[in-house]
Every structure is written in C-alpha cells, then in structure tokens.
Image: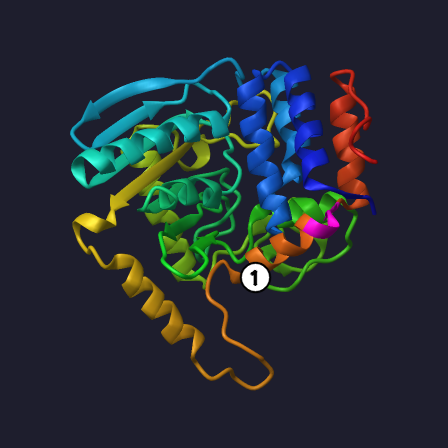
Amino acid sequence: MPVVTAARLREWSQRVLQAAGVREQDAQLVANSLVAASLRGVDSHGFHLLPHYLDQIAAGDVDPAQTGSIATESGACIVYDGCNGLGQVVADICCGHAIRLAREFGLGMVTARESNHFGTAAWWAMKMAAQGQIGLVFCNASPIVAPWQGKEGRFGTNPICMAVPVGKHEPWLLDMATTTVAANRIFKAHTNHEPTIPAGWAMDKEGNATTDTEAAYSGLLMPLGGYKGSGLAMMVEILCGVISGGAMSTQLGGLRVRGKKFRASQTFIAIDVLRMQPEFRERIDWLIDQVKSTAPASGFNEVLVANEPELRTERVRLKSGIPIPDGTYEALLNAAARFGMDDSGLRG
C-alpha cells in the first residue's frame, strides 16, 4: 500500500484536475479539500473521490467552467444556482456569502441548487467557524437510502454538520451522515475488493440486512437509528432540496451516475455568536471541559468530544503520510491516464 505525503498528493491532484480542464484556482481548492479529508482519516470523502470527479468531467456531467450565480437575495437569505459547476467551487462561493450576511445581519443562510459533490461538509463548516461564527452545513444526495420500513431509495446520506469557534480548545466539529455510515465507505470497500462490511451498514436489493460488500454496493444504506435517521434525512432534504427549489429525492443523479447531472442542493448557515453571547468561546470551553472531565466507562481511557479522533489522525498523517489502498491507487492512475497523466511526482 503506497504512502504519500499530503504535499505531494495535493500537488499531483491539482495537476490532474488542471489537465482535465479545471481552472488552476479551482483545481487547488478541490485538491485541498480532498486531501484535508484524507489527512483527518475521513478517507471516504478524501482523494478516493478524485477518480469519480474526473469521470464526471470526462463524461460532461459536470461543467468545470461554471461558477453559478445568485438566483435570489433578500435580507440575510440567498438562493444560489450552481449551474452544474464543481461542488467545491459552488460551496466556496456560498460560504463566502453566508459569512458576509452573518456579519451584516447576525445570521446568514445560503442555499444552493444544481450543484455537485462538495467533499466533506466539515471543510465548509470550519470555514465559517474560522471567522468566529457557528457554521451549519447540510446537503442532499443520491437516493440510495430507503425510508424506514421501505426497500426503495428515496433519500441520500444527507449529512448534518456543525462547527463552532472555541477559545483554548481545538475546534469542536460534528459531521455525520444520517445513515449508519457514509455511502463512500461502502464504495471504498468495493473499490478495494474488501469482501465484507460491518453489520448495520447496508441492506441488499430486497431490503435484507447484509454484510456482503457486493450486495451492499448494489443495495441500499441503512438509516441511522432506524426511523430517527429516516426523519433526519427528510429534514435535511427539506432544508436543501425543498427550500432551494432544486432537485429532490429520486430527481437527483449521483457521483457515479453517468449521463445524468447530479443536481445536489446544499445549505450553509452562519451565525455571528458574539451578537448573542459575547462570552461564547469561554462558555463552549467550559462545556468541553465538563464533558472531558467525565469518568471513562469500563474499557475506555478517556472521553472524547467530536473532532478529537480526526485531529489525532491528522497529526499522525502529517508526519507519516497518507496511506492509499491499492485499489484506490489503481483507480487514481486509471482516471489520470485519461488526461495524459501518470503518477510522476506522486511517489517520491
């Protein structure tokens, strides 16, 4: 299994994206967001996605020249039309607007339609938190999740993400799918020929729980916590697809669907916390301290809060490099070869 430094992976990914026709600054943005996810150990949303982005571009299912435009703006609210541009490019613009609106009004809400996969929601929520704002991010996705008690896909993994500014602590960040796991964890297992997945992740085409990777790949994901996850997924669909006027449920395509636009919708909410609570950072630090001071249960050494595991993985991978499973490495090279690129510069 190759191990590659983050710097090499960023530079190589950017060059491949540029070879595919993506503008330099946009290629840098996409590469940075993917490698950041891989550094944090969120491999399902890291550079593992690059071959699929390249496939989309080659097939003409995404327009890398598009940046989208504001459809409507009223007070602290914007509806943005992504015009089928790259998801990271659309999200970066929307985040900028949300931050601007929050500074002006105390709260900014921007919802995008006709967008594409934007990597991890965490990347965008943290951009808002870095500006001293609470960042909330939601998005809908390919209908590969059946509603509770069903066996046909109607929802996506529809993640929920929140990042908050802190004082003395490292950033608190929650980024979770409304399914038991993110879909890309199953796709990653399939790409790397892993025969089984853990129980509770997926069901087969008939709605039966399965641990077989192939059956899961052609089946459906399990909603998180049964009917509760199903309800959360629909909540996200309302906050994204319904409110933006964009595609909903079965109207969406997918990152791996050719000949059809993805049409994802995403919502970004920024909150200027100082307008409501000048001592917000001190208070969130106190809350984190309270949680961390909890006596650990049997079998555990400490109590962790959201984002701690990922930050620890990031520190390790910044030093030792990012491991690339053989199947993923092969997929990267095959996709890059389509645009005349090889692994020169990727491996030292």
Say above or below: 96 vs 67: below
Name the side, left or right, on which 343 lies relative to 257.
Answer: right
* Rendered image quadrant of residue 172: bottom left
Say above or below: 286 vs 2: below
Q: Residue at x 63, y 64 (%)?
A: 199
Please tell me which residue lies in front, 13 or 156.
Answer: 13
- The image quadrant where one finds the C terminus is top right
Residue assigned mark 1: 309
Name the side, left or right, on which 62 lies relative to 14.
Answer: left
Is 271 one of the magenta-colored residues?
Answer: no
Give the amino acid type for the residue marked by disc 1 in the picture.
Pro
Find numbered disc 1 in the image and state the secondary structure of the residue it sits on: helix
Q: Residue furthest bottom?
A: 298
User: Which segment is the magenta one?
Assistant: 319-323
* Rendered image quadrant of residue 18: top right
Please tell me which residue lies in front, 344 or 215.
Answer: 344
Q: Is residue 52 visible?
A: yes
Name the side, left or right, on which 173 lies relative to 207.
Answer: left
Please tell me which residue lies in front, 246 or 219.
Answer: 246
Q: Residue at x 61, y 23 (%)?
A: 56
- Name the spot of residue 227 as percent of width and height, x first: 40, 60
* Rendered image quadrant of residue 67: top left
- Name the spot of residue 182 as percent of width and height, x first: 55, 50
- Name the spot of residue 154 as percent of width and height, x first: 45, 43
Please tell me which residue lies in front, 9 or 340.
Answer: 9
